[in-house]
Image: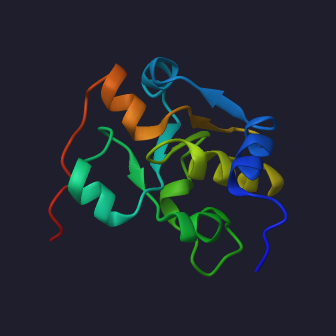
Amino acid sequence: MEVKKGVNELVAEAEAQVITLTPAEVDEKSKAAGVTLVDLRDIRELKRDGTIPGSLHVPRGMLEFWIDPESPYYRREFDEIDEVILFCNKGSRSALAALSLKTMGMDNVSHMQGGMSQWEEEIGRVEPLPARK
């Protein structure tokens, strides 16, 4: 099978169309009411590395379904959200996801440059994944 457009090209195209924030900008914006950080990483990554305090975990494959009020999978957590900042491990998945939400008509979405890896390096605040009840 031949790939006509690689993932690097897709990510570059997404980043040219969405807002990209540094970890420091995310840290500052996350303090405002109505701003929610969304961790798109796989549950195994969260268990291994923890997450940014106060972030909401949404599996990447469910993002569009959970955020669309018309979807049978819609999650009420999104009722009170004014702005969404997406992040993943390195920033590629979140760039693609931000473009997807922008395509859905959301204009209050951005993603974090460098993802969780860059957050850990520059900010360092991480909390372990809470135990499930």
Quarter placement of the C terminus: bottom left
Please state if 84 lies on the left or on the right of 122 as rendered: right
Q: Residue at x 58, y 63 (%)?
A: 63
Q: Residue at x 69, y 48 (%)?
A: 8
The vertical placement of 68 against 99, above or below, is below
Q: Quadrant of residue 109?
A: top right
Q: x, y percentage for residue 106?
A: 76, 48
Q: x, y percentage for residue 21?
A: 59, 26
In the image, 69 versus 26, the foreground residue is 26
Q: Residue at x 54, y 42 (%)?
A: 91
Please state if 110 lies on the left or on the right of 57 as rendered: right
Please state if 121 lies on the left or on the right of 10 as rendered: left
The vertical placement of 73 against 43, above or below, is below
Query: Furthest-front residue in view?
Result: 2
The vertical placement of 65 against 111, above or below, is below
Q: x, y percentage for residue 54?
A: 33, 41
Quarter placement of the N terminus: bottom right
The vertical placement of 14 against 21, above or below, is below
Please state if 23 lies on the left or on the right of 49 as rendered: right
